[in-house]
């Protein structure tokens, strides 16, 4: 979802609130009467704060303009705190995808974006990041309102990381280059790294802004144009930040010192000797098309004029995207998919610290995190102590209106996800796992679920195999390293893993043995802009972030030229 340095903006210590004054009621064990109870303050959920932001952008963004869907249709986007409608958003379908792809294609083939210098592209990305920083309070509020995540998390962690990611990719824009290579003969050989063209991007609802940055940043740095389908559950912040790419920004720069490419418009009356400029993104370079997966998403994945697809979401949907891309023009695909990440607590662990980190690894972002540490493996020597303290920590977790200070957990994203999580909880009870706490709905409206802890979980149970994507911690027991390595790897997923140990040899053994794209040692969810992220097995194809993400949006061309009478080879 560590120090307060920017590289650890999503690590645990930055925004884990202390124990709150809003404990809550829990159902108990399998019978419904657990070994502990919560004290529920319904005020934390029922008395809601009015979001301090207005919804101004609800149309499709195509070719630099906000437009209605061709069909005229809209869909409701909801407030997860209540299930009530925030706004109605234009619903893109195949005709709108065609319009957006056409705009992106023209911008790539005929527009200035891929032809301007890399330094100019870098400056545009930096100006955009500055605009986002200026509007960060509104964006954090909009993200919380539309998604349900705690405002403190959005404002203190995710918005700064969003800005950092665009600074990072702006830095890469003018450092992308090819190589020269020796040949067995009189030839000059060079490679060119060229933008791939029109990139189709499909982002999920759990981290709308962060996923926007992961996708858009590297694609633009490489000189591509984009058609991005925002999730139907959370379209509002993507539309807002896309508007900022075309928004005016006031800055105190002397007019005579302003570079020509700023496209300045002097505001003599209001700002003498100052300048006003746009972030600078040409029309058609970035197009935002909110809509549903089977219509807008499928149309984008199968489009014959899209050169590349990047998708983040479930493994099952990723298979569909891959198939559509293959059956159309065989466009390359990057997939960041599901996970069932092990979090391994070794026998030498400081139990109190391990409990807190394991709690964060699972419950962060309401458990709606693809790399959540959702299989908590605990060595048998410390299992009982760990279990009791984990249960106590879950009972202390503060759940309520995510706009309220000190709230650790807001509502789940929508009714569908809410019901899915409750079905998995019932499955855990029916399969004879022990429900230590939680297990039910919290409050009378919205999509709040009690923080839930299961003990006695076995590998064959659905709660130990499937991606629940909710606040449900499954605690399993292991006896030695060979046992936990075998069981941790016995999954179709391989996105991430966590290891908690004081033994360097143990850490080295596990980090190499675990088949996962990221292994966090004594930390979790550290999402530095430079750290690549992606999965093994059915957790995806390719990597996001870091230098590796640039490879997703580049073509490599070899250019060979004969040399006449070369002085050297």
Image (tube, helix red, strand yellow):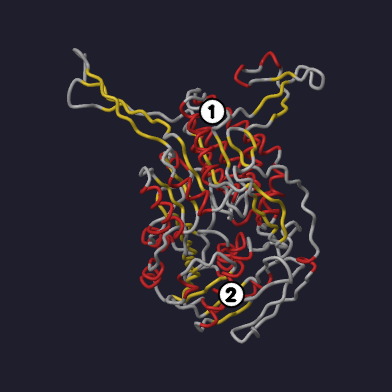
Q: In the image, is 393 to the left or to the right of 378?
A: right
Mark 2 burial class by Cα count in 10 Å: few <14, some 14-19, many 20+ = many
- Where the C terminus falls, by quadrant? top left
- Pinpoint residue 390: horizontal percent, then vertical percent: 60, 73
Q: Which mark is residue 121?
A: 1
Do labels 1 and 2 touch, CB within 8 Å? no
Residue ranking furthest to the front:
71
Neighbor class of circle 1 (other Cα within 10 Å; few <14, some 14-19, many 20+) is: many
Labels 1, 2: front one: 1
Residue sitting at 55 percent across and 59 percent down? 369
Q: Secondary structure at mark 2?
A: strand
Q: Is residue 440 above or below residue 339?
A: below
* Residue tagged 2: 453
x 75%, y 74%: residue: 40
Comparing 78 with 390, the one in front is 78
Return the residue nearer the eye: 11 or 97: 97
**For the image shown, how many numbered marks are present on the structure?**
2
Say which quadrant the N terminus sits in.
Answer: bottom right
Residue 439 % position (x, y) = 62, 76
Residue at left 52%, top 81%? Answer: 433
Percent coordinates x, y for residue 416 in the rendering: 60, 65
SS assignment at label 1: helix
């Amino acid at each position: 979802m560590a120090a307060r340095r920017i590289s650890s903006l999503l690590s645990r210590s930055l925004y884990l609130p202390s124990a709150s004054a809003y404990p809550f009621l829990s159902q108990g064990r399998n019978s419904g009467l657990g070994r502990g109870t919560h004290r529920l303050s319904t005020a934390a959920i029922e008395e809601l704060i009015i979001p301090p932001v207005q919804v101004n952008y609800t149309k499709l963004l195509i070719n630099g303009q906000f437009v209605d869907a061709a069909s005229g249709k809209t869909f409701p986007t909801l407030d997860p705190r209540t299930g009530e409608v925030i706004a109605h958003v234009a619903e893109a379908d195949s005709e709108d995808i065609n319009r957006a792809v056409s705009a992106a294609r023209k911008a790539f083939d005929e527009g200035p974006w891929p032809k301007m210098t890399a330094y100019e592209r870098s400056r545009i990305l930096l100006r955009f990041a500055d605009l986002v920083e200026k509007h960060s309070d509104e964006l954090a509020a909009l993200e919380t309102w539309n998604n349900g995540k705690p405002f403190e998390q959005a404002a203190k962690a995710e918005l700064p990381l969003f800005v950092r990611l665009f600074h990072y990719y702006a830095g890469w824009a003018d450092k992308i280059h090819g190589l020269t290579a020796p040949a067995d003969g009189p030839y000059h050989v060079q490679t060119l790294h060229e933008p791939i063209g029109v990139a189709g991007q499909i982002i999920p609802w759990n981290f709308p802004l962060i996923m926007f940055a992961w996708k858009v940043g590297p694609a633009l740095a490489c000189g591509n144009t984009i058609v991005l389908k925002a999730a139907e559950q959370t379209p509002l912040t993507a539309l807002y930040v896309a508007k900022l790419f075309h928004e005016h920004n006031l800055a105190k720069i002397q007019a005579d010192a302003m570079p020509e490419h700023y496209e300045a418009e002097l505001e003599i009356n209001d700002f003498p000797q100052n300048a006003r400029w746009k972030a600078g993104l040409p029309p058609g370079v970035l197009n935002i098309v909110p809509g549903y997966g089977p219509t807008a998403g499928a149309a984008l994945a199968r489009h014959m004029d899209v050169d590349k697809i990047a998708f983040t979401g479930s493994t099952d949907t990723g298979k569909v995207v891959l198939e559509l891309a293959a059956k159309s023009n065989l466009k390359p695909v990057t997939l960041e998919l599901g996970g069932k990440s092990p979090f391994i607590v070794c026998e030498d662990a400081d139990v109190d610290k391990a409990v807190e980190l394991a709690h964060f690894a699972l419950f962060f972002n309401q458990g709606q995190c693809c790399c959540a540490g959702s299989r908590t493996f605990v060595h048998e020597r410390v299992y009982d102590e760990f279990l009791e303290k984990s249960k106590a920590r879950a009972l202390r977790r503060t759940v309520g209106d995510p706009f309220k200070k000190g709230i650790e957990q807001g509502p789940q994203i929508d009714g569908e996800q809410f019901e899915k999580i409750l079905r998995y909880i019932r499955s855990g009870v029916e399969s004879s796992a022990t429900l230590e706490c939680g297990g039910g709905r919290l409050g009378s409206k919205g999509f709040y679920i009690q923080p839930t802890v299961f003990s006695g979980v076995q590998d064959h149970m659905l709660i130990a195999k499937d991606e629940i994507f909710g606040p449900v911690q499954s605690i399993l027991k292991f006896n030695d390293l060979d046992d936990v390595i075998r069981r941790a790897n016995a999954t179709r997923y391989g996105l991430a893993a966590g290891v908690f140990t004081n033994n360097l040899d143990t850490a080295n053994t596990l980090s190499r043995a675990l088949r996962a794209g990221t292994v966090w040692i004594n930390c979790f969810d550290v999402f530095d802009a430079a750290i690549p992220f992606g999965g093994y097995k059915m957790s995806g194809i390719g990597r996001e972030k870091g230098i590796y993400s640039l490879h997703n949006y580049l073509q490599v061309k070899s250019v060979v030229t004969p040399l006449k009478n070369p002085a050297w080879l």
